């Protein structure tokens, strides 16, 4: 069976050679049409006024530090 003429069989001592390109038009990941966008690219969620009013107020820095100290207390 004859080998085809377009294949190159490396000889001992030959170095591998590689070719690279930075052309984005040939990158398959960039040609997907943005199908992998996270969560379908929806707009940010804005809660209703009644939901926003029902949330508790955030704790102050001092309250958070006191809670952290209480949790980390090893006594």
Image: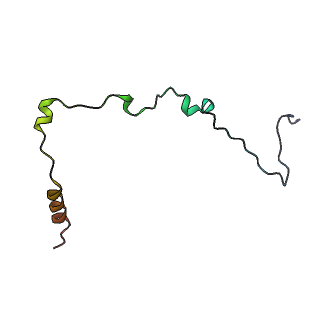
Residue shown at the point (12%, 45%) measured from the top left:
57
Question: How is the model colour-coded?
Answer: rainbow
Quadrant in the picture for the N terminus: top right
Left or right: where does residue 5 sit relative to residue 74?
right
Residue shown at the point (85%, 50%) measured from the top left:
11
- Residue 6 quadrant: top right
Q: Residue furthest right?
A: 2
Name above or below for residue 3 compared with residue 66. above
Task: Residue 10: give x, y in percent of width and height.
Answer: 82, 47
Q: Residue furthest bottom?
A: 75
Name above or below for residue 75 compared with residue 44. below
Quadrant in the picture for the C terminus: bottom left
Task: Residue 64: give x, y in percent of width and height.
Answer: 17, 57
Q: Nearer the viewer, residue 34 or 4?
A: 34
Left or right: where does residue 65 sit relative to residue 22?
left
Task: Residue 18: give x, y in percent of width and height.
Answer: 73, 44
Residue shown at the point (55%, 33%) measured from the top left:
29
Left or right: where does residue 32 sit relative to residue 3?
left
Residue shown at the point (45%, 32%) measured from the top left:
36
């Amino acid at each position: 069976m004859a080998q085809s003429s377009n294949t190159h069989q490396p000889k001992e001592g030959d170095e591998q050679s590689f070719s690279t390109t930075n052309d984005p038009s040939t990158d398959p990941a960039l040609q997907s049409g943005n199908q992998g966008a996270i969560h379908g690219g929806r707009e940010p969620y804005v809660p209703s006024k009644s939901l926003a009013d029902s949330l508790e107020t955030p704790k102050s820095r001092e309250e958070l530090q006191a809670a952290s100290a209480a949790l980390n207390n090893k006594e």
